[in-house]
Amino acid sequence: MTQFINGRRLAQHILDKLPARIRKLPRPPGLAVLLIGHNPASELYVKLKRQSAERVGVRFSLERRPEGVGRSNVLGQIDAWNADPEIDGILVQLPLPKTLKEQPVIERIHPEKDVDGFHPVNTGRYLSGERTNPPGLVEGILRLIVSTRVSINGHQATIVARESVFSRCLEHGLAMLGVLARTVPTDGSHHNATINSDVVVVAAGKPKLIVGEDLKPGSVVIDVGINPLPDGGVVGDVDTDTASKMAAWVSPVPGGVGPMTIAMLLENTVRLAEKNET
């Protein structure tokens, strides 16, 4: 019988430990967030991040910019936060408007204030083994897998995603757990890989791309997809109804990766603040 991985409960367990760590610091950790435009999903994510930050005691600073904001304005705000000693972590909410390129904006964040962990300096350090903490999204996924207590050492994993820094970091993180992982495209050619995998992670941005017949019986399936529905709801990249007939564990959407990503964002903010005091 399939069990659903309770990301909300695991995330709350992480968040519950943060106030005690924050009380040991000389000041509350500072998290700065830049929100550009009025993407409804981004508005919701930022709202949830603010609520969680305020509950645990992280100081949340939000700056908004209109969709047509110039590149120099965005980079100037990041520069100001880089120079602010009370800001420990900086996050630019993605996706950005088409008029702005993501990479130059991400790279403008100082590596020591990169709370997401996807700055090229930090991903390079992680992939080389110099840095132990993976990017927050990757760490959240790994913790969800570990929480199942399924023995995966020596097993195989498939990541259905675009070949990117995310997939390379996730492959590395799974390797640290003793799992041989590979990334396959999101073009529908995944079946031969996923049907033979004990762990499947899907970040394709395609509703219900993975169905039950794509999965190995007893596998662990992590659904990273968040696809909006006309009625205002969301659906993942995995067809939960059919997947639940094959997999042993499935992370639901919503309630799986999403809450964990927020928890990791705030834990990383506290980590950065602690590092600044050493």
Image (cartoon, grey):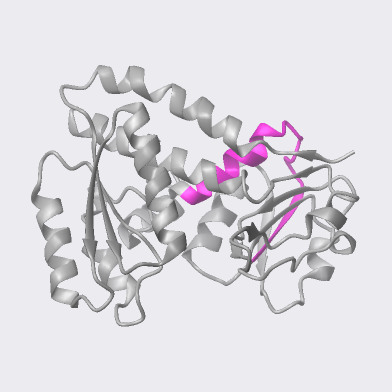
Q: Is residue 196 left or right of residue 82?
A: right
Q: Is residue 188 above or below residue 259?
A: below
Q: Residue 79 in the image: state x and y as whole percent.
A: 12, 59
Q: Nearer the viewer, residue 188 or 174?
A: 188
Query: What is the quadrant of the C terminus in the image?
Result: top left
Q: Residue 12 in the image: state x and y as whole percent.
A: 52, 29
Q: Residue at x 72, y 34 (%)?
A: 148
Q: Is residue 278 left or right of residue 141?
A: left
Magenta highlight on residue 157: yes
Q: Nearer the viewer, residue 60 or 276?
A: 60
Magenta highlight on residue 203: no
Query: What is the quadrant of the N terminus in the image?
Result: top right
Q: Residue at x 76, y 35 (%)?
A: 151
Residue 18, picture quadrant: top left
Q: Which residues are magenta?
A: 137-160
For residue 132, say whether it is visible: no
Q: Residue furthest front?
A: 231
Q: Is residue 206 left or right of residue 259?
A: right
Q: Is residue 233 above or below residue 96?
A: above
Q: Is residue 278 above or below residue 269?
A: above
Q: Residue 4 in the image: state x and y as whole percent.
A: 75, 40
Q: Residue 40 in the image: state x and y as whole percent.
A: 44, 63
Q: Residue at x 42, y 44 (%)?
A: 48
For residue 234, say whether it is visible: yes
